[in-house]
Image (cartoon, rainbow, N blue to C red):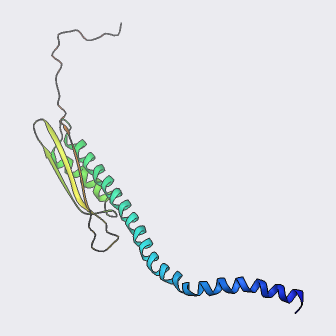
Amino acid sequence: MTAAGRHRTRAAGPVMRVRAAARGDRGEVTVELVLATPLLLLTLLLIIQFALWSHATHVAQAAASQALAAARTHRGTIAAGQDAGSHVLTALAPGPLREAELTVSRGPRGASARVSGHATPVLPGLHLAVTAEASGPRERFVPDTSTAKPWSGR
């Protein structure tokens, strides 16, 4: 055998041993891929579901805030709060927020608004509740009863 032939035989020896050792691992990548891919996709869908829930919560909070702002004014009413909140829900909620319900109340000292519903599900059977509340004091008009003369600007 020539020197080149011996060299190939020596190099082939370790390569053949590595290949023989790796024969027991054949198909292992396929099994790992079959197990890892669904878990990766499930994780991705859960991240998307969380983002939709977060967006739905922000939409509900915006509607509750607008309803409160309309209901708590000096001449505000429950109907005005309902209209303002419903307008926001009509404009923003159809995508991320499902089955939205708006409740506005107004008392002698304050007003409140509550929006509840469910985030749009990405995964079947997963219905995440969304609730947002806003409350604050009613605005009231207090007439000036002081006897001081108005400022004349001089």
- All told, the count of numbered labels is 0
Residue at the limit of the structure toward the left, as seen here: 108
Picture residue at 42% right of the left edge, 76% below the top: 38
Picture residue at 18% right of the left edge, 44% below the top: 112
Picture residue at 87% right of the left edge, 86% below the top: 4
Q: Quadrant of the N terminus?
A: bottom right
Residue at the limit of the structure toward the bottom, as seen here: 1
Residue at the limit of the structure toward the top, as seen here: 154
Front residue of 98/75: it is: 98
Q: Choose top left, top right, bottom left or bottom right for residue 142.
A: top left
Q: Choose top left, top right, bottom left or bottom right for residue 42.
A: bottom left
Image x and y of residue 136, in percent: 20, 38
Residue 150 higher or lower than 36, as above or below: above
Residue 4 falls left or right of residue 38: right
Residue 9 higher or lower than 105, as above or below: below
Image x and y of residue 68, in percent: 22, 44
Residue 47 falls left or right of residue 2: left
Q: Quadrant of the C terminus?
A: top left
Q: Choose top left, top right, bottom left or bottom right for residue 138.
A: top left
Image x and y of residue 130, in percent: 25, 58
Front residue of 76/22: it is: 22
Front residue of 30/101: it is: 30
Residue 153 higher or lower than 103, as above or below: above
Picture residue at 16% right of the left edge, 22% below the top: 143
